Image (cartoon, rainbow, N blue to C red):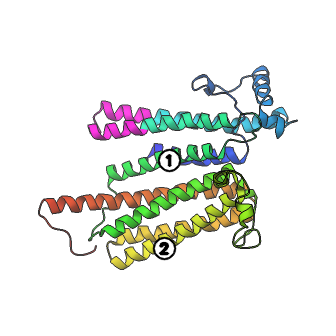
Amino acid sequence: MITLALVALMVVVGGATRLTGSGLSITEWKPVTGAVPPLGAAAWGEEFAKYQASPQYKLLNEGMSLGEFQFIYWWEWGHRQLGRLIGLVFAGGLAFAAVTRRVSLGEGLTLFAMGLLLGAQGAVGWIMVASGLQPGMTAVAPIKLTLHLGLALLFLSTLVAFLVRLRQFGRDDGLLTPGLRAWSYAVLALTFAQILLGGLVAGSRAGFAFNTWPAMDGGFAPGLDTLFATSPWWENFVDNAALVQLNHRLGGYLLLLVTIGYAVAVVRARFCRRASRRAIALVHIVALQAVLGVATLVMVVPLALGLAHQFLAVVLLGVAVANAALLRERATRDRSAAAAGQGLPQAAE
């Protein structure tokens, strides 16, 4: 639970680092010695000189003062330190659980695999930063930023699913149909995909264009000449602000409709009051997230709204993962009961 809270915080701090333009302020990756910030005027001057040699400084921030550099430096430094802290907390918890035999061999191997995923996330983070230090670049590559975000979300999802397995919060009663379980997976998959589309919006700075809603460029969508202005055509899905933002809008509409449909199906099936409450909560979170997204867009991405939108996305994903994991746990119990000849429950809670 501590690791989960730190990862959620990490996603928000990462968003703040991006929105403040701080991600390229540290031009080197030193996993150990990089934990020590510059100490003294000479050290700060050396770090500033490294940044002044970067394309972002030359093309975007030329003339920046040392104080302005220190502001963005501390954001990126804090982001990296939080990443180190997450690694230490997770590794320390895993070691303690292994030594005291608080987890089974299978659970231990699962946690070890999650640790490898966490390490890969850190490596991809540097690959992302390195993409923004290439000649002519003033920001990181959108696809690499989205990959960095996606791995963070995947690690967060595994944490939530593992936590549900360990704690077994509020077990569901009633007869679960395969359709409801499949629908819960659809909500989860669309949520994950929609957040990744949001990562592309962030990476391409698409939120700073077409700042009207529900109209976009004077209509439902811009013309094809705008949506596919870049060659080759597939790059438009990553770098073209118009198409990237349109895809994120369409993904939001689809997610809201599917989540509402899922909630209606759960309530009508009278499967379980707990499951019904979770489904209705998902609708409320998606609706609030949509409102936050529209407000962030029309107000041209103020920092507070941008971070709130990103944090609520993490909450939404966590609830969607927990919901799907709880239904999976219920399906596993049903199969076990059937195999044991005990039959299935006939009445809802």
Relative to 312, say whether 66 is above or below: above
Residue with the most extreme front position: 232
Crowding at dot 2, Cα within 10 Å, few <14 / some 14-19 / many 20+, comes out as many
Q: Which mark is nearer the camera, 2 or 1?
A: 2
Secondary structure predominantly adopted by residues drawn in magenta? helix
> Where does label 2 land, which residue?
260
Q: What residue is rendered at 48% in x and 69% in y?
A: 259
Secondary-structure class at tag 1: helix
How far across and how far down the image is residue 88, in percent?
A: 48, 32
Asked which secondary structure carries label 2, the reply is helix
Amino acid at circle 2: Ile
Amino acid at circle 1: Ala
Q: In this rendering, is residue 185 above or below 261?
A: above
Task: Give the residue pinned by disc 1.
Answer: 5
Residue 301 visible, this orientation: no
Q: Residue at x 72, y 23 (%)?
A: 39
Considering depth in this image, is 37 or 294 the residue closer to the camera? 294
Q: Mark 1 or mark 2, which is nearer the start of the sequence?
A: 1
Q: How many marks?
A: 2
Q: Residue furthest bottom?
A: 268
Residue segment shown in magenta: 91-114
Rendering coords of residue 30 (x, y %): 61, 25
